[in-house]
Amino acid sequence: MPYSKVMPALARAKPDKLFGMRLRSTVASTQRKELKSEDAQLDSSCALVETRDVINGAKAHRSSQPKISIDFDNTQEAYKSKDTLELFRSLLVFKLCSVDFLVDKNKELMFLSKKVLGQRLFEKLMKMTFYGQFVAGEDQDTIKPLIEKNQAFGVGSVLDYSVEEDLTQEEAEKKEMDSCVSEAEKENHVETSIYTAQDTKSMDHREKKYKAHRQFGDRRGGVISARTYFYADEAKCDHHMETFINCIKASAGSSVDGFSAIKMTALGRPQFLLQFSEVLVKWRRFFNLLAAHQGLDGMALLEQKLELEKLQDSLIKLGVGAKPDIENWFTGEKLGSSGTIDLLDWNSLINDTTIISNLLVVPNMETGHLEPLLSKFTDEEEKQMKRMLQRMDVLAKHAVENGVRLMVDAEQTYFQPAISRLTLEMQRIFNREKPNIFNTYQCYLKEAYDNVSVDVELSRREGWYFGAKLVRGAYMYQERSRAAEIGYEDPINTDYEATNRMYHKCLEYVLEEIHLNKAANVMVASHNEDTVKFTLEKMNEMGLSPTENKVYFGQLLGMCDQISFPLGQAGFPVYKYVPYGPVNEVIPYLSRRAQENRGIMKGSQRERSLLWKELQRRLFNGQLLYKPVY
């Protein structure tokens, strides 16, 4: 499909802007250098005095900030919002989650309970236990009391309608293969059933990582802390969009500064995400190859600045295009005007090949020639791509109109490059005045820091607000198994400690950006108390105040209240991820929460011990009948 056909679709999804904007080039960096050289010509003693004054002023400002100190052992503060029955319920649910048999058979036991007790008694039992612990209510009206109570104790909400399809493994695999294999591939007589680990031959320049494989068709496998959507048809995607719009409206109606979460795979056929991800990765890989030609390999990504003339010569020699075409690539308003091209400039070329190429076009690493990823696209496939982008645009506009921030969840690595790029395009449009759109970065990935630093630099150059949610990641076991079975590099850090280091490295980088430029925002989405303490320590060092509303914290409803509520009562922006939906339809969600809590409860008894401590405190102080006042 010609790029020129898809680009108008992109433009109509967000009139004339979504992929039509050109990135700023290295001019910004050059201007900073010029300013430095001008400063050097001033009297050196003046420069020293000015610098010392700035440093002393910064230190004085930091020392004037009150130090942030929160006692996460203070159970009275942690559970101030809970009555005693709620504490007993938490203890019961966490204890049940630590019993392997109950967790392994949780779905079967829930269905058996419903059969024995009947629908009405089953719902009552669930609301007294698991549903009451992890789900806010059945609809937008029933969730309001809980949201208002949490808000009274300093905790906001990220709303999520947690109804899921309860598919069999076979049904999930069939839907995945049908939605991830293009008509061009089917016409080449390659049956979906032969996409196995033994299938080593690529077709139409496709890589194994970015093709669907039946044994990993059920994307729920090994995933316990993330919801999975499977494509059925365009009407189903429209239904998902309407559900997200209702969440946005519910968030706007229940709080003044809420979030709403969306998943990109709910909004369209995943075939496009697979293909666009492969294009983005191959273009970055080609940049790395050209950087190596200029002896720049081994340097940090954003330090690799290719000399423009040498780059053009290399592209012409490789046969990428004729000399006039190559020269036209670098004749934008600012692109290449500094004489060098960095990764951000290079990424912008994907936007600008609209006139000379196809959308899903990749450089052949052996010949250097640009080749289409697939031989052709059908009219229906083109429409499906267009509709996905239009749905994203509709959701972003609704979020902005309702004063709700939109959080785009991360997904598997074979989808994520496209998801991140499309989210970034929304940020460039909707984050001009404040951070309305947040991207999610999975810090268990080896490339997490590169992704964060590149996107922060882009936001600096273009002058929009960077918004990020940092998570450790939800797909580790599935990602590792898929990489080993199919035969590509494991994208996950070597161990848990490496992931912790990566999380803290990314977090510190964003906190520094907040400290220096005040144009970044980050949600520390973590149940790890050490990470929360690390964040508070860095905020103290940098003089960042919770009242600036630049650093947020996030945990799941029903978990880690000993972190969320002390933070909220100390004035930090902290949010609970608040699921809601009818009892019967959130059973898959409850099943995952049970499995997730099994790991947490076995790894640490801290939450249970704090709950017991608070119960004992209330007993000895005659407060067993305590009711929260708000």
Image: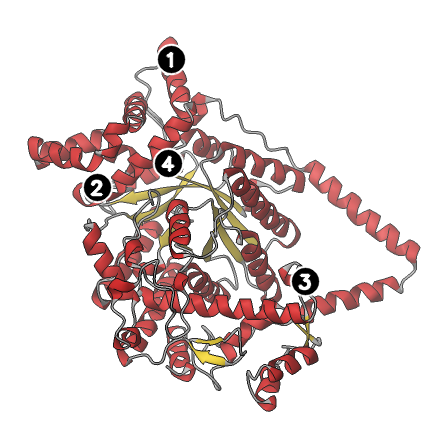
> Residue at label 1?
616
- Comes first in the chain, label 1 or label 4: 4
- Quadrant of res 77: top left
Residue under the image location 78 percent in, 68 percent down = 34
> Residue at label 2?
587
Residue under the image location 60 percent in, 47 percent down = 511
C-alpha span from label 3 to label 2: 49 Å
User: Quadrant where the C terminus lies?
Assistant: top left
- Quadrant of res 13: bottom left
Between label 4 and label 3, give the one nearer the viewer: 3
Residue 405 visible within the image: no
Residue 150 numbered mark, or none: 4
Between label 1 and label 3, give the one nearer the viewer: 3
Q: How is the image coloured?
A: secondary structure
Amino acid at the residue labelled 2: Ile
Q: Characterize the local packing of mark 4: few (<14), some (14-19) or many (20 or more) Cα atoms within 10 angstroms.
A: many
> Residue at label 3?
303
Q: Secondary structure at mark 3?
A: helix
Please name whichever residue, 124 or 318, is drawn nearer the observer in this view of the structure: 318
The answer to whether mark 3 and mark 2 are in CB contact below 8 A is no
The answer to whether mark 1 and mark 3 are in CB contact below 8 A is no
